[in-house]
Amino acid sequence: LGHVFVDLGDDKKALVSYEKAARLRPTLAEAQENYGVLLLRQGFATEATRAFEAAGKNEPRSGRAQLHLGNGLRAEKRYADAEQAYKMALELDAALLDARFNLGLLYIDNPVPGQEELVRLQKGLAALKDYQAKAKPEPAVAARLADYIDATDKRIQKEIKRREREERRKKEDATAKPDPGTPKPGAAVTPPVAKPPAAPLPAPPATAGGVK
């Protein structure tokens, strides 16, 4: 019944229907997934993630359950966990191209902890190109995807050039740095001050009575 309401565009009734199905059949992964998808669509990321986690427990070998879990975790900004869920989805089902696509978006759009920007962008670009080659999306989607790939490639090239400039600047600074023992150009050099000569020793006192 929930599918009917979704087709009619009535998400509120669909949500009630899916929630009831998930509650009455908690071990049915499909019910949990449908409920989670609609929760996520309406902005309830935490609740959606719980439903996807339940679906994953019911069907631990389901790549699609892990894909949905990754989407929920990403919406919660738990990017490292989302990455692991997408990777698990691909391990369980290498043909699940939506997982590769979403993994690519995760890398490009989100700061995954422990990964620097250039590495993330390169991994994301590779994932999207792989999706582009294998999924063969319809023309409208393909055009948007191509634009996104092109924009990502430009970001990568810009970051590479920025790093190259930074590296050159560091080398130039290191080359131009003067020796600590060399006086700076134009600085006055004070000559060493000569010590005055030592005073002569006094003559010994004369003997009384004069010299005989």
Image (cartoon, rainbow, N blue to C red):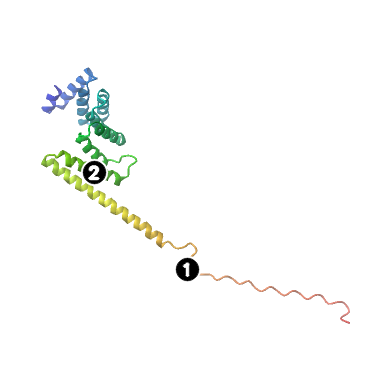
Against 184, is 15 above or below?
above
Image position, residue 77 (x, y; %): 29, 35
Residue where numbered disc 1 is placed: 187
Residue drawn 24% across the image and 34% down it: 90
Image position, residue 114 (x, y; %): 34, 41
Residue drawn 14% across the image and 25% down it: 3
Q: Is residue 38 left or right of residue 200?
A: left
Is residue 103 visible from the viewing direction of this image?
Answer: yes
State the separation of the CA atoms marked 1 and 2: 57 Å
Taking depth in this image into account, of 208 and 177 the one nearest to the observer is: 177
Taking depth in this image into account, of 87 and 165 the one nearest to the observer is: 87
Residue where numbered disc 2 is placed: 126
Could you tell me how many numbered marks the image carries? 2
Q: Amino acid at mark 2?
A: Ala
Q: Residues within 10 Å of mark 2 (few under 14, many from 20)?
A: some
Is residue 75 visible from the viewing direction of this image?
Answer: no
